[in-house]
Amino acid sequence: MRNPNSLLKEYFGYNEFRPNQLEVIEHTLSGQDSVVVMPTGGGKSICFQIAALMLEDLTLVISPLISLMKDQVDSLTTNGINAAFFNSSQSDFEKREILNACMAGEIKLLYISPESLVMAFDNWLKSLKISLIAIDEAHCVSMWGHDFRPEYGQIKNLRAFLGKTPFMALTATADKITRRDITKQLGLNEPEIFLSSFNRPNLSLAVKGHVPKKNKVTEIINFIKNRSDEAGIIYSLSRKETEQWSETFNNAGISSRFYHAGLNPETRAQVQDGFINDNYQIICATVAFGMGIDKSNVRWIIHTNLPKNIEGYYQEIGRAGRDGMPADTLLFYNFRDIILLNDFIKDSPFKDTYVEKINRMVNYAEATSCRRNILLSYFGEFNDTKCNNCDICENPPEIIDGLTQAQMALSGILRTNQQVGVNMLINLLRGAKTMDIFEKKYNEIKTYGVGSNYSFYDWQHYINQMINYGYLEIAYDDHLKLVVTDAGRNLLKPDAEISLSRPPEKKSKAVKQTAKKQKAVAPKNDLTQALKKYRKEIAQKNSVPAYVIFNDSTLNEIVTQKPNNHKLLLDIPGMGKVKVERFGDDILKIVNDLNSIVDLDKLPSHIQTFKLYEKKLDIQEISQKRDLSENTIYGHLSKLYEEGYDVNLHKFVSEYEVNQVKEVRRKLKSKHQLKPVHDALEGQLNYIQIGLALTIISKIEQDN
């Protein structure tokens, strides 16, 4: 059986597994069931793909979306792995061809939708030899999951004729109740739960509350323009909003499309494919978009409304930065979002649970401590270290005695008989001279104008905290009026205390985030642009997305490392054996052509020597041009040879002479000193020849 590490390197171009991947593979190979919870971009697919390569027969991958199947099959075949998908998009002839290939043992992984699977139960499925069942997006089987799909419930019927074949259920987001339900609904046999860290440190987290619509549009447009040519997704709660946002962006000269479940399947597929293939920058979508999207170079996610639960929110922001490079996430919300979300669930038999999930989402949005740690704790992962990549950590709040502000707000609410919402209360406290204030005669009450020294923004910040801490409630069923709780009334007592955070200074993060990102992405130089152009041309020829050829992280490494031979190119993460065989010569030519114009003085000394060696200069000529001794030049060539550069040391020492040194060295106690070898050979070879021979011998031993 092949070693999983060697398969990882050969087919995927990576030297080591991420946490839990190898353990999942080994557990599966022992024939046992598993539930694998890894964050989006955490490498779930590698678990069953490597296992499939090590198992004798077919691996059946149950996947909910045709686009997901196509993406993964494109990636696998590009990496040299025989894979196919079977779904309603294919003709009967294509389906027969695929099944024949599976029965002949020519396919290692077959992707299939749960609907097609159910139809195959009493048909062709029993004629296949199956070694593993992998259920991707397994949260779809659970009523508690955020993308419930009833067809998933019939997957457990596979047990009837597959016996002890291991099942691997995979999902990016599942809390404890969902994990238990996955196990029950799929009929898993005492599965091992593999729970990876949910920490995605490359994602910046920011939240903005109660921003007026006009300001929100301006802020989002500025956000996007600071990230020109970077792909992103805008999530909104309603279909109408997605269309409005798309129109707004297109009018502002920003290429976008909208996506929601109300579009016909052909249009949805066209929009999705266009985004995956970089035909336009932005998708404005409802949560109907994104599950299983493998696009690795999404650089930002914006939510224009509060999501309905943390599981969905976490999976949606996880679609950014799948290549491990920095990506930004930004959430806008207001209290009307909460009304809309509660309206969605008012008739649900699980209303109480859904309300609690909405409340947890509100708590996240209103947080005054590290946002990343709040997300991690939701999924059962404790961390008390600041992430330094969320808006709270970057601008930590100052804690103050907030009793005066709290009592002003409580007095204003009670003196109006709890008939005001947040905006009206703030206008009252600030002494605003608006028509509705005078109509209701709020200008005549004692609290009018007592808080005029605080800005509207300041009061919004203080009141939101009081709501979040439980001193106030919002009557969502009565025009968003503020209600004072028992805890709030206790704050009116003489000995009461309350700590609030001071409102942070209003300043844009755009400049800071943009600067941070410029350090992380591939520099905008000629080599970057040339590689991107080549990648796009090859992708179009092969009818696959550009990131399938190699992603931005791999491109960045090529630009940074500037490999000049196949061995060094193989050392680039993401460049497996098949990709190097298919694209290596082209990539190396691009790198070498553009690298030739680099100022030699800025390169390491031995690399400067290599540049002259590449031009076919002999040792004496290189020595003269570099003003270095010939011995030093030979030393450079030895180092270059050790590092894998294309240097032919046999020009200076023959294979026969290398074998002479090898034989003498075998008999000597000292393996690396030159003098004993020189003496044993009675001066037949000089010290330079012996040194070069030892370099060749050492390299052979190392490679073996």
Image (spheres, helix red, strand yellow):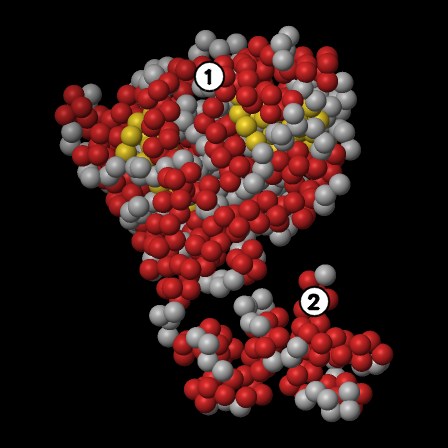
Estimate the x, y position of residue 534 in percent, counting from the top left: 37, 50
What's the distance in space between the residues labelled 2 and 1, CA to CA? 53 Å
Q: Mark 1 packing: few (<14 Cα in 10 Å), some, or many (20+)?
A: few
- Badge 2 element: helix
At label 2, counting other C-alpha atoms closer than 10 Å, the crowd grade (few under 14, some 14-19, many 20 or more) is few
Quadrant assignment, res 492 = top left
Q: Quadrant of the N terminus?
A: top right
In the rendered structure, which amino acid carries the disc numbered 2?
Ile
First reached walking from the N terminus: tag 2 or tag 1: 1
- Which disc, if any, is residue 413? none
Image location (x, y in percent) of residue 584:
49, 54
Q: Is residue 238 visible?
A: no
Query: In this figure, which residue is indicated by the disc labeled 1?
Result: 91
Three-letter amino acid code of the residue under disc 1: Ser
Residue 605 location in percent, x, y? 49, 79
Mark on residue 700? 2
